[in-house]
Image (cartoon, helix red, strand yellow):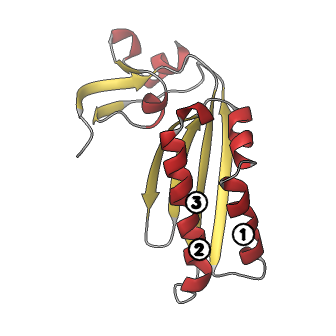
Amino acid sequence: MGKSIYPGRFTADNQEDIVVFMIGMRVNQWWAVHKWLPVFLAMPPMMRELAKNKELGCLSMESFSGLRTTYLLQYWRSEKDLFTYARGDLHLPAWKSFNKRARNNSAVGFYHETYVVPKGSSEAIYVNMPRFGLANATFHISVDSKLDTAEQRLRR
């Protein structure tokens, strides 16, 4: 079942600092399935855990995949929540296993980026979209004449 579409223009209103975390992998050698598949399969259990247990601090996530690269975009309540989860029972063993497999292994690549976004220092627009991204993690509000342009949304 799909998400409801909100017709018109909407923006996100993050009233608190937020942490944006991007993580993913790249398959460099398709034929080395035994090297990249375990990395690929490690993420879904963590995504399920975070979706079920909002108290862990992950506010929202979106996943994307291309021919070689996966991309997971997450919004976290705080740096502390993200780092606590990174040291937790599900993530830490997966991370240790990945590091063991990744040594001397160019079959799979991995990346992550973390950004701390202070409240009031972001801008977003969503047109005819379901709740998505920052608006899904924070507040999804209709655009009015005071929020019509990107500059107005960024400077509010």
Picture coordinates of residue 147, whole percent (x, y):
40, 15
Residue 29 visible in the shown view: no
Q: Is residue 43 above or below residue 41?
A: above
Residue 108 visible in the shown view: yes
- Residue at 43% in and 72% down: 67
Q: Is residue 135 left or right of residue 128?
A: right
Sequence-first disc among 1 and 3: 3
- Dot 2 surroundings within 10 Å: few (below 14), some, or many (20 or more)? some
Secondary structure of the residue carrying tag 3 is: strand
In which quarter of the view is residue 104 placed? bottom right
Assess whether mark 3 and mark 2 are in contact (beta carbons under 8 angstroms). Answer: no
Return the residue at label 2: 38
Assess whether mark 2 and mark 1 are in contact (beta carbons under 8 angstroms). Answer: yes
**Rounded to the nearest whole Å, what is the CA distance between mark 1 and mark 2?**
9 Å
- Dot 3 surroundings within 10 Å: few (below 14), some, or many (20 or more)? many
Picture coordinates of residue 85, whole percent (x, y):
69, 44
**Rounded to the nearest whole Å, what is the CA distance between mark 1 and mark 3?**
16 Å
Picture coordinates of residue 129, whole percent (x, y):
29, 36
- Dot 1 surroundings within 10 Å: few (below 14), some, or many (20 or more)? some
Sequence-first disc among 2 and 3: 3
Q: Nearer the viewer, mark 1 or mark 3?
A: 1
Q: Amino acid at mark 3?
A: Gly
Q: Nearer the viewer, mark 2 or mark 3?
A: 2
Q: Amino acid at mark 2?
A: Pro
Picture coordinates of residue 90, whole percent (x, y):
65, 54
Assess whether mark 3 and mark 1 are in contact (beta carbons under 8 angstroms). Answer: no
**Picture disc at residue 146:** none
Return the residue at label 3: 24
Secondary structure of the residue carrying tag 1 is: helix
Return the residue at label 1: 97
**Rounded to the nearest whole Å, what is the CA distance between mark 2 and mark 3?**
13 Å
Q: Nearer the viewer, residue 17 or 80?
A: 80
